[in-house]
Amino acid sequence: MTLSIENHQIGSSHSPFIIAEMSGNHNQSLERALEIVEEAAKTGVQALKIQTYTADTMTINTAQDGFVIQDQDSLWKNQSLYDLYLQAHTPWEWHQPIFDRCKELGLVAFSTPFDETAVDFLESLNVPCYKIASFENNHLPLIKKVAKTGKPTIVSTGMASLGDLEDLVRAFRENGGKDLVLLKCTSSYPASPNGSNLNTIPAIKNLFSCEAGLSDHTLGIGVSVASIALGATVIEKHFTLSRADGGVDSAFSMEPHEMKELVLQVNQAWTALGSIQFGTVAQEKKSLIFRRSLYIAENMKAGDILTTNNLRILRPGHGLAPKFWNTVIGKAISKDAEKGTPLSWDLMLG
């Protein structure tokens, strides 16, 4: 199931592909957007993602019921959808300078299109891959349009039922899509660990024969690190310069020092998975001498009998293994032995 995005291999045998999501954290400043790119590159992530839409391609400008966020617990309460997207969108003329800066710094740069016109625009910029957001994972015409580009596609699965996922995977593959990554996602902002259900990740891999990962809206890094143990090969986290600066997504976005720590810990978790291994590994060889073994515990003469008083199971590990205790108790030794002598077969009478 391994796939490639630019020069990065994505799969269980490769280190995790970590995406910093800028979203609307540029706060309508291109200068800030480029600074976000620069700070992201310093954290060690592999990719930076933006979003491609306008307020008019997302919704209509009205305050009618349903077009204003009524949830008083929402970060965006009382805002109209149109005003929110007007504030959060990334101007299309910014895409090229953002992508150019990413390329200069060695980052994979791509975007989430929210309608077919955005795909056409991103194709003109020759993006290497696409992302489909959770709120668009039921937008089958968009998924088909992206699939026809033939490029690797990452899809967040927030809110999607199993049937929804079957529909999107079928639409993707029947329209020429090949390389697919499905990200477990909880579409609340911020999300809580108890709603993350990371055990879904291996199920996604098995059900859809694709790579799986995590789009993580929780605070901190613990959930992302835990996902690695369950087979996540892609991690996406929102990223900002400072939450104190405000912005539409700032409350659940990572600051540079946090993203750097996430990159470190996620890669350590992946390295620690290793392979199925029993027995001594290379790093343990120097420790073998400190295992327990059988030692003469009193000065003895040739012909003396080994008993529970003159034989002990001690550290270090130069003597016979403790499993031979019952075999040797009651046996005579073949030569004199001082206290502290490791017991060996040649010290025993036949």
Image (cartoon, helix red, strand yellow):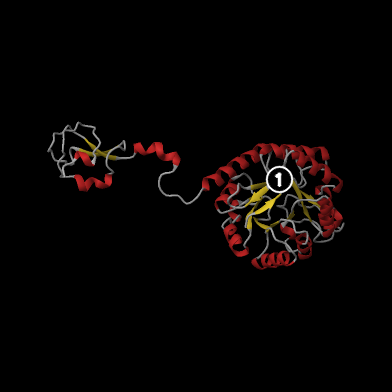
Residue positioned 63% across, 63% down in the render: 208
Q: Is residue 53 visible?
A: no
Where does label 1 land, which residue?
47
Residue positioned 69% across, 36% down in the render: 42
Tell me where residue 172 sits by quadrant. bottom right
Task: Provide residue 226's location: percent of width, then percent of height.
Answer: 56, 49
Crowding around mark 1 (Cα neighbors within 10 Å: few <14, some 14 to 19, many 20+) is: many
Residue positioned 20% across, 45% down in the render: 328
Residue in the foreground of this view, choosing between 95 and 88:
95
Q: Amino acid at mark 1?
A: Ala
Q: Is residue 57 visible?
A: yes
Q: Give the quadrant of the N terminus.
A: bottom right
Task: Provide residue 85's location: percent of width, then percent of height.
Answer: 81, 52
Residue in the foreground of this view, choosing between 291 and 74:
291
Residue positioned 75% across, 61% down in the render: 147
Tell me where residue 120 sits by quadrant. bottom right
Q: How many marks?
A: 1
Relative to 125, 331 lies left or right: left
